[in-house]
Image: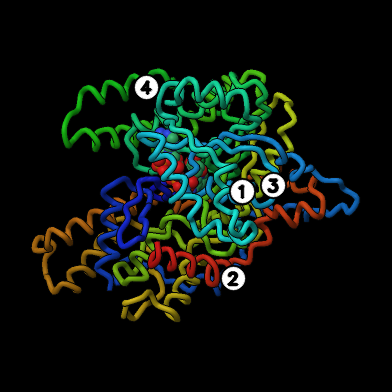
Amino acid sequence: MATRNLLATSNTVKLNGVSFSSSFTDKPNRYLARCWAQTTSSRRVQTACYYRETSLKAVTSLERPEVETDTNCDGIGIVRFLKGKSYLVTGATGFLAKVLIEKMLREGPEIGKIFLLMRSKDQESANKRLYFEIIRSDLFKLLKQMHGSSYETFMKSKLIPVIGDIGEDNLGIEPEIADMISEEIDVIISCGGRTTFDDRYDSALSVNALGPNRLLSFGKECKKLKLFLHFSTAYVTGKNEGLVLETPLCIGENITSDLNIESELKLASEAVRKFHGREKTNKLKELGFERAQHYGWDNSYTFTKAMGETIINSNRGDLPVVIIRPSIIESSYKEPFPGWIQGIRMVDPIIVGYYGKGQISGFWADSKSLLDITPVDMLVNAAITAMAKHGCGVPELKVYTVTSSSHANPLRFGELMDLSYQHLRDSPMENTEIDLAPMKYHSSLESFTSSLSNKMKRKEGESHISTMSDKQKRRLKYLVSMARIYKPYMFFQARFDDTNTTSLMHEMSMEERKMFEFNTKDIDWKHYIANVHLPGLKKQFFQG
Ligand SMILES: NC(=O)c1ccc[n+]([C@@H]2O[C@H](COP(=O)([O-])OP(=O)(O)OC[C@H]3O[C@@H](n4cnc5c(N)ncnc54)[C@H](OP(=O)(O)O)[C@@H]3O)[C@@H](O)[C@H]2O)c1
């Protein structure tokens, strides 16, 4: 989330095998990659060590009853549901969908086919994407062990790459292929999306607002479709404080009736025609930000995801729909092994890319803000459980929020940074020799900017900002824009209601709860950040 969904983006830049996918679009990613390659006290500042002082304190109490374990409960029948069914998944080359596919194949070896819609110029490159980005991914090593020498045959028998683009009419799928898939699939899983926070308005509208509807229309053509499952985001309501409910979004009800999606599309197309050359992208990004702010969202990402939800809600007809709203998705807690992550996302660039490398010593943030992280494996388990529960064809729309701040032990930004400080002090980033100090928290952008420019000048021995090198100026500009984009998440005080998600847990059998665990209340943050997430991030940085 941050610069994108607290910063996840599909526009990765690879350097030495490491994927940089902080939520900015091309430039920022390349910038972060460059910073990485170069390895190696200011006003109104609050210093760290927040974790030890205040850990586990909740500002807004959201106590939920313990999840009762009914030993006689038959459960939902998750494994039974997976068996023999076929699926269409979008976003399969992305972080979340890969973990989802891995779990479905591991727990449901008798699953039918999983069609993977992916952007590719031809079938050969789609096959290559399947092979190099999925089948050969380290993520699947448990499956590899399970299937031994028949692993690749198993994977190729289950995973079918389909060329497509959710931003295009008819999903960009060849008509004969679309016809064939429509005969076979039982469930559509909508994972694909543009996850850059400061995205171009036209692109975000086309993919995040209209893309899910294109999939939904296709779903209506599918003869035996039982469920349409869509991944949205917990930040879709645009609220930064109070309680965010698990209610479907509807223009005129919980979204202002002033919002007219047709007019927004028109506005974006006019801007596409009006601007040219190098200014075009910037103007379209600015437009996205302005329109989002105008209607009460933080950025074009969450705004267009909200539009996507409203369109699904109004066009679903009698198709059963599940909307999953995750918070910031981070590395796996346990499965298939702890610490797996794809790309450097959300606040990760701040931690390992800048703070851990000594390039920043503070950030524009409130140490007490709720950083709502959900490990990707818990999210996947919740999604598969919801799929099994609602895949029986009842025509309703159900929203599940999968987050961690709904419980009494939410993680706060200060706690995360204190744990990161302790970890990076004891085991610094490779090739880094710095005397790491606890993170400082700037309460204003001015304070952050001035502290950062002073630090840069001290480092380079310059006395005036005007004499900074172009490289320094670009870095300063980038970090300031990053701080601006992350701001809503660095001062975030809302809590997410997860009544539906908790109820879902109640319906699981004991065995299902072990196999598909998603009680975020059980997360041991100290263990997760220090022993799982940060080591996972470092591995990702160095090994790609
Ligand atoms: N990551 C988070 O923290 C987070 C939090 C809340 C919700 N979510 C939601 O979860 C979903 C998955 O997120 P993620 O983190 O896995 O994202 P990701 O790693 O950035 O992956 C995005 C996926 O979407 C695909 N995609 C993008 N544009 C497409 C298009 N026009 N047509 C077809 N596919 C397209 C990408 O394909 P290419 O490989 O071709 O680019 C990629 O496979 C998204 O809907 C996101 O909004 C994510």
Camera-near label (4 vs 3) is: 3
Residue 108, labelled with which disc?
A: 3
What is the quadrant of the C terminus in the image? bottom left
Residue designated by label 1 = 380
- Along the horizontal axis of the image, is 512 left or right of 448? right
The mark nearer the N terminus, 1 or 4, is 4
Q: Residue at x 57, y 56 (%)?
A: 375
Residue at the spot 38% in from the left edge and 49% down from the top edge: 23
- The location of residue 311, given as percent across then percent down, is 52, 24
Name the residue that disc number 4 marks: 265
Q: Which residue is farthest right? A: 72
Q: Indicate which disc, 4 or 3, sits on the residue closer to the N terminus.
A: 3
First-in-chain label (4 vs 2): 4
User: For this rendering, which residue is in front, 486 or 518?
Assistant: 518
Give the alpha-carbon distance from disc 3 to disc 2, as whole Å. Answer: 30 Å
* Type of the residue with mark 2: His
Q: What type is the residue that disc 4 sits on?
A: Leu
Between marks 3 and 2 in the image, the one whose residue lies nearer the viewer: 3
Q: Which residue, given by chain and number where applicable, does mark 2 sit on?
A: 527
